[in-house]
Image (spheres, grey):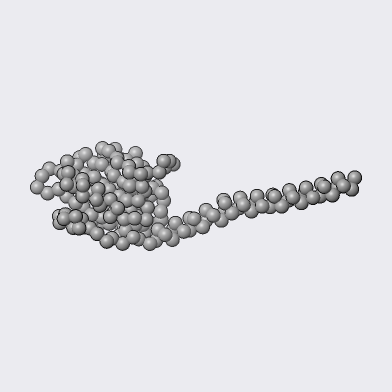
Amino acid sequence: MKKNNSSLGWLKWVGFVMALLLGGGLYFVYGILPAKIGGALVERSKIHKPLTESPKDYNIKDFENVSFPSGGVTLSGWWIPVRGSHPLGTVLLSHGVFKNREQVLSRAVFLHRLGYQTLLFDHRGHGLSGNSPLSGGLLEAQDYPAGAGYLEGRHLLKKPVVYLGFSLGAISALRAAAQSPGVDGVIADSPLANIK
């Protein structure tokens, strides 16, 4: 009988240690780790990648530095019009996370040379735009309709209207287009597989 009691005591001790390790691991994975990752993302989003080039570097001299409001944040961008001919449409472009509008500048130059007018903008919390937390496309989705509204207010928006985004910009473009009846198309370059 004594042998059985000592075996049970030992098993209880192992069970207690295993439960303690499991509980500690779950606390770390679901409590500490998300807070650390979230805090790091918030801190990282306060650092804006500076601009090092512009459309002028691609021999486009007729462009304009613009700014417009989006959900309480001022966004910054470049307006590249098509002069001397009727534009084929308007394409609004934006970049991926922790980048700026330079990431889509070569695409805008390509589209401009084909005859499309383009608006490249820095998402909120990026580039020269105002500070805002990173939201995985939830808040950033407001930026595309804000850009279209800005162009429409200046009577510059020409159909068809296309939202083109890369990574975070692609997620934002998809979210924005779903709620924007005036958008004719979306080009989503490298969005996440699931944006829910």
Where's the C terminus, which quadrant? Answer: top left
Which residue appears at 52% of the width and 56% of the height?
Answer: 35
* Residue 68 point in image, percent of width and height: 27, 54
Which residue appears at 42% of the width and 59% of the height?
Answer: 44
Q: 20 or 143, which is in the foreground? A: 20
User: Is 70 on the left or on the right of 134, as rendered?
Assistant: left
Residue 151 in sight: no
Residue 185 in sight: yes
Where's the N terminus, which quadrant? Answer: top right
Residue 75 location, quadrant: bottom left
Residue 184 location, quadrant: top left
* Residue 165 point in image, percent of width and height: 31, 46
Which residue appears at 57% of the width and 51% of the height?
Answer: 29
* Residue 80 point in image, percent of width and height: 19, 51
Which residue appears at 23% of the width and 41% of the height?
Answer: 161
User: Is 108 on the left or on the right of 7, as rendered?
Assistant: left
Residue 67 location, quadrant: bottom left
User: Is 22 on the left or on the right of 73, as rendered?
Assistant: right
* Residue 103 point in image, percent of width and height: 30, 53
